[in-house]
Amino acid sequence: MRARVRAEVLKKSWNPELNSFVQAYGSDVLDTSLLLIALLGFLPSNDPRVTGTVHAIETTLTHDGLVKRTRLRSTTACRREKARFWLVVSGWWITWRCKAGSTKRTTCSSV
């Protein structure tokens, strides 16, 4: 059962057009909870699908060293959530960068 669920997640949550895992099967929405794929050991940090996902998150959801949980599509939701960054997901991002060996803009000594 575990292997079947893993295979399904790897197949259905991967979006080759984005070169990234996505929030839901068949979606094109990034979500920084996807950083947990490597942090919890589902895939290694250096797996190309993980590095692709992190790159997509970095280019889409980060600003000045902070990370948004996801990019909202609704105009109303965007206005409400305009400047919200989640410190916990910023921590996941820094932890992933440290585990992957990247020290750019991070301090990894305590991770």
Image (cartoon, rainbow, N blue to C red):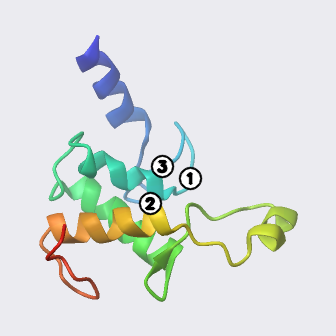
Which residue sits at x=52%, y=36%? 25
Dot 1: what SS?
loop
Disc 1 residue type (three-letter): Asp
Whether 24 is drawn above or below 4: the answer is below
Q: Residues within 10 Å of mark 3 (few under 14, many from 20)?
A: many
Q: Are marks 1 and 2 in contact (CB under 8 Å)?
A: yes
Q: Where residue 80 sits: x, y (%)?
A: 82, 68
Relative to the observer, which residue lies in front, 45 or 64? 64
> Which residue in the structure is indicated by mark 3?
22
Q: Are marks 2 and 3 in contact (CB under 8 Å)?
A: yes
> Which residue in the structure is indicated by mark 2?
18
Label disc, if present, on residue 28 of the rendered structure: 1
Q: CA distance from mark 2 to mark 3?
A: 9 Å
Q: CA distance from mark 1 to mark 3?
A: 6 Å
Lower sequence index among marks 1 and 3: 3
Which residue sits at x=32%, y=36%? 10
Q: CA distance from mark 1 to mark 2?
A: 7 Å
